[in-house]
Image (spheres, helix red, strand yellow):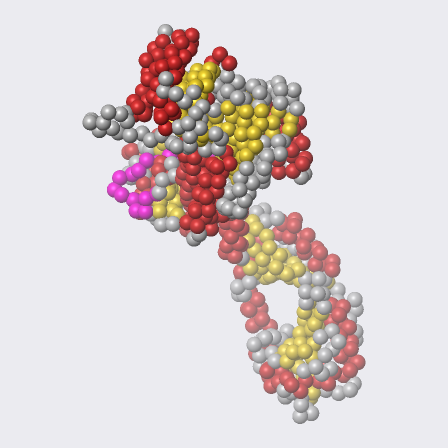
Amino acid sequence: MASPQGIAPTETHVPFDMADAAAALIDARGTITGWTPTAERLLGYPAAEVMKQPARTLLAAPEDMAKAEAIAAWCRAHGGWHGLGRARHRDGRRIEVQLRISALRDPEGGTSWLVSGIDVGSIPSWALSGSLLQGLLTRSPVGIAVLDPGLRYVWINDTLERYGGVPRPDRLGHRMGDFLPGLNAEAIEAQMRQVLKTGKPVVDYEYQGWTMAEPTREHAYSTSFFRLDNAEGRPMGLCYMVIDVTDRWRARERLALLNEAGARIGNTLDVMRTAQELADFAVERLADFVTVDLLESVLHGEDPVESPGRTLPAFRRAGQASIREGCPESTTTAGEPVTIYPSSPVARCYFSGEALLDPVMDVSIRAWAGEDPARTAKVREFGMHSLMVAPIRARGALLGVASFVRSRQPNPFEEDDLLLAEELVARAALWIDNARRYSREHATALALQRSLLPHALSGGQAVEVASRYLPTDARNGVGGDWFDVIPLSGARVALVVGDVVGHGINAAATMGRLRTAVHTLADMDLPPEELLAHLDDLVIRLTEEETGQEGVAAAVLGATCLYAVYDPVTQRCTMARAGHPAPAVVDLSGEVSFPPLPAGPPLGLGSLPFESAELELPAGSLIALYTDGLIENCDQDVDVGLGRLRDALGRTALPLEELCSTVVTTLLTRPQSDDVALLLARTRGLDPGDVVSWDLPSDPAVVAGARSLAIHRLAEWGLEDLMTTTELIVSELVTNAIRHGTGPIRLRLIRREVLICEVTDTSSTSPRLRHARTTDEGGRGLFLVAQLTRRWGTRYTEGGKLIWAEQDLPEPA
């Protein structure tokens, strides 16, 4: 674009010192929006007088308006203007001003204009000296070059000559790619051609590479290009200015590297995995071979030492990586113990707690030569020439040592590399320590969970059982659901399933307390509804005790439970529930139903009573007890979950363990949102020949007959070895029932894993074990029963009480 007559930038080389220049800011409409104190000194106008005024008020004369409009058009077309102009002082006199107008862009794309000016009369004559300007450009700390339209060097200053490492005479008349092979000359020249074509300057173009001044070291440069035009506006060449920004680039690279490390290291809570991630990340980015050696105690989750002693602890190789496949440089396999000699760099780093830098590995090789010839051989075989060792320290404690080695990279490690390694290891140390702490707490939680859940379930001769427990976090394995199978007196068995609110260690601890309470209450032979009532009282008391511990209190309050007692003699099951889902029952025909048991409130509310229901479960029936996580984990509502459960349980022909797996697989089609517990029980019935009972009148004369009946039955069962003790037990229990109770009386013998003797009466008075004195004539009956049996006890029935005693069967011949 040709310039207007007399408006093209002047060719006068006048230094433009911004420190002394007056400046004003003019918006796109020509209104003054900024005014500096220097402008006030130059033209005499205070800021309050000119702000928000049209810039034309500063023109020296009306005839200058046409020139001002031409200058404005030039600025809009070329992005700026410089030259001589006239302005009017506040007192009316005219001032010759050297002007420079520059465009300013705001984020929304708008344009403002910065107008800077210096009174030409104040510029000393020596400032116009061309030799001074030449000297300034030549010795400028910024590299400057002038190129012709063919991109051949016409002129360079001293700084650019020093950057490139090529003498000035050798560069003049040549292009960049002819003597700087370490730079991407093609990309740089593409920027130059674009500037020559459009006239639009390029500012702060960054690139990296090496030059002949330092061929083994990469540098970063920031370059700005602008076109050189003659008075007619035709391009005459190009000028570029370059500065070395290596320090800035390396700082930015280090920051980016550390940010990337945060995303790549510590993604798991596994100590060995985290150590390996550190080694993998550092290879190629920082070193050619990296090892991470941790204290043996750290890998076991133990607390690390805060200050090293005088002897080296046991180390283990937790991670290693190399640019060579298989880490051939290593003398130790990952996961194995590491032999560390006292004079080695690793030992010195561990004892001092400070990072070590051995740029050429002379100190390290001398230390290894006498004690570790295998390592010395590896150093020489693979050309290892530079070493860094950094302590792995977290929260004031030493966890181990990380080593960084260069072999293929020719440049030795420098202090900046050591600082980067220390920062990288420091961040990884926190992740390793977090993984160590997690491993320890996880192991503790798992040990607690295993101690609280039943190790093996056995339904004896009453039921066949199978179970599954799936906490929400399957990897951690800690949850609040539980189940149990508890043997009861009279060949009966209790089936229990419960759900504690929440997950994790608090839920697991609460579950353990409730499970223990259920076991204790079950030993009292309480009916299901009474057991839940006592459990509810316990939960209320625990909630009051744990008021200050919200996590524990929340886990206790609102827990649910279902308690069922199955009697294989009568083949009936009595159940009660506290806010828990009803069980599923599969009859002998394979039909699945959900008995409508009284719901009962969740534990800890204490608002409503608990009620029980009794079901007939002939031998071969199946009952499924579960927590709500099994049916509510589906992607649809609870009814859909119950439908899936019904379909899965319909496959009764499957073995019980296989059926248990099928149910879990069928229902858990999405990631779990809650813990899941499942208990399947297939009922069994006792052989009628293994149970015998007699109704007896409440008359002391029947005691001898009761003994005789029991002896004859034992003879039929082939249990002659138990006749004597059974005769005494029957005599004592029947006598007590006649003496302290009311009739009628029933005597029952059950043969299963043990021999069970039961005596039922209509009295609700519980017998008491006494320790008779030597002078007492009686009171030793129950004491003898307790001594002769494996266990004995009392349970209450609807019409009275039942006293029972168990004896171990003799070993078969």
Query: Residue 336 occupies which quadrant of the picture?
Result: top left
Query: Residue 524 occupies which quadrant of the picture?
Result: top left
Placement of the N terminus among the 4 image quadrants: bottom right
| Magenta stretch secondary structure, dominant | loop
Residue 183 position (above or below residue 102): above
Residue 352 on the magenta segment: no
Q: Residue at x 53, y 29 (%)?
A: 574
Q: Give the image location of residue 623, x and y in percent.
A: 57, 26
Residue 402 position (above or below residue 89): above
Write the start and end of the magenta stretch as one range.
Answer: 304-321
Residue 310 on the magenta segment: yes
Q: Residue at x 77, y 79 (%)?
A: 67
Q: Give the image location of residue 106, x and y in percent.
A: 68, 67
Seen from the viewer's position, the closer of residues 377 and 345 is 345
Q: Give the image location of residue 60, x and y in percent.
A: 72, 87
Q: Give the image location of residue 198, x and y in percent.
A: 74, 60
Left or right of 639, for residue 547:
left
